[in-house]
Amino acid sequence: MTILQVACAIIIDHEKRVLVTQRSPIMKHPLKWEFPGGKIEPGENPQTCIIREIKEELTVDIELKSRLPSSIYHYSSFIVELIPFVAIIITGEIYLKEHAEYVWANPNELRDLDLTEADIPVLNFFLNDYYNFLN
Ligand SMILES: Nc1nc2c([nH]c(=O)n2[C@@H]2O[C@H](COP(=O)(O)OP(=O)(O)OP(=O)(O)O)[C@@H](O)[C@H]2O)c(=O)[nH]1
């Protein structure tokens, strides 16, 4: 089985809340919550991919702060390598082009969301090893 490489963004605001998006009913994993992002295209690097995907999906420009460890997850029909970046919004207003909903969530709210499975180790790493070091 091939591995689908997907870049995603953990976008934080000045209150240390995190932007999470809900997949629409017509997407794979309908109505699950995720970190926005998408598939890396041939010849693209993960950094370029995530900046492009966030502009396409949310209409905002982001600046990348850190890359976190990848999460590899075996779904029934494919394997995903989820490559997370911590980022901030530098310009634009959020307008959802594909997702059903978004929220700015604090750590307790993040833990309560029905996230896609590949995102759970990403969230755990972010909250356990990264979050407390944010200013
Ligand atoms: N964007 C995003 N995708 C994720 C996350 N976690 C995760 O397993 N994925 C999976 O990685 C793939 C990302 O591709 P995509 O966002 O371009 O998804 P898509 O709906 O366009 O895919 P499709 O065109 O195959 O339906 C999806 O199959 C999605 O379920 C995540 O946090 N963010």
Image (cartoon, rainbow, N blue to C red):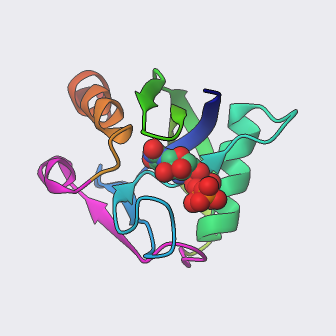
Where residue 109 sits, quadrant-wise, is: bottom left
Q: Is residue 104 left or right of residue 92?
A: left
Q: Is residue 105 magenta?
A: yes
| Residue 118 spot, x, y in % from top left | 38, 37
Looking at the rendering, the stretch of residues picked out in magenta corresponds to: 94-114
| Residue 128 spot, x, y in % from top left | 21, 25
Compared to 111, does 127 lie above or below? Answer: above
Q: Residue at x 52, y 32 (%)?
A: 79
Q: Is residue 114 left or right of residue 101?
A: left
Instruction: State which quarter of the image contains the C terminus.
Output: top left
Instruction: State which quarter of the image contains the N terminus.
Output: top right
- Camera-side residue: 119 or 89? 119
Q: Residue at x 29, y 54 (%)?
A: 17
Can residue 101 be seen at all in this image of the molecule? yes
- Camera-side residue: 33 or 68? 33
| Residue 2 spot, x, y in % from top left | 65, 28
